[in-house]
Image (cartoon, rainbow, N blue to C red):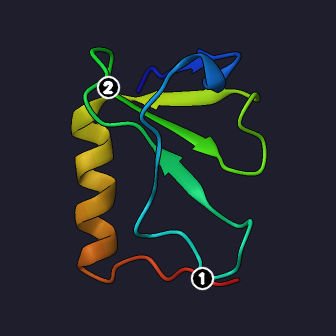
Amino acid sequence: MTELILPDAALLTGWRKSSYSGAEAGSCLEVLDGHPAGVPVRDSKDPHGPAVVFPAAAWSSFIATLKDGELACHG
């Protein structure tokens, strides 16, 4: 899998908190819908930091795995 790294995620607009982020304030992933290269993901605590752009198919597979409960998230 080849992903793209965006050095300054703040250059993109339209970020939303992932519904899979933890309930703790500040421990959030943000995703951006509709990006032509895939699905950008960033750490909400560092909006000017990098974002990783995952291929859409890989991101969809990851989300499906989470929904199926195959991965356990621990804080």
Q: Where is mark 1, residue-wise? A: 23
Q: Residues within 10 Å of mark 2 (few under 14, many from 20)?
A: some
Report the side of 15 relative to 62 (left or right). right
Q: Give the structural element (helix, strand or loop) at label 2.
A: loop
Please, what is the three-letter code of the amino acid marked with disc 2?
Answer: Gly
Point 78% across, 41% down: residue: 46
Q: Amino acid at mark 1?
A: Ala
Depth-wise, is mark 1 or mark 2 nearer the camera? 1
Q: Secondary structure under badge 1?
A: loop
Q: Earlier in the sequence, mark 1 or mark 2?
A: 1
From the viewer's perspective, is 58 left or right of 72?
A: left
Quarter holding the C terminus? bottom right
Image coordinates of residue 26 in percent, x first then y, are 74, 65
The residue drawn where x is 22% and y is 64% is 64
Front-lying residue, 50 or 17: 17
Q: Residue at x 60, y 82 (%)?
A: 23
Up-down: is 13 above or below 60?
above
Q: Who is closer to the viewer here, 42 or 56?
A: 42
In which quadrant is the N terminus drawn? top left
Which residue sits furthest front?
A: 13
* Residue 9 spot, x, y in % from top left: 62, 25
Q: Quadrant of residue 58?
A: top left
Quarter of the image holding residue 68?
bottom left
**Residue corresponding to mark 2:** 38
Q: Residues within 10 Å of mark 1 (few under 14, many from 20)?
A: few
User: Which numbered dot is residue 54?
Assistant: none
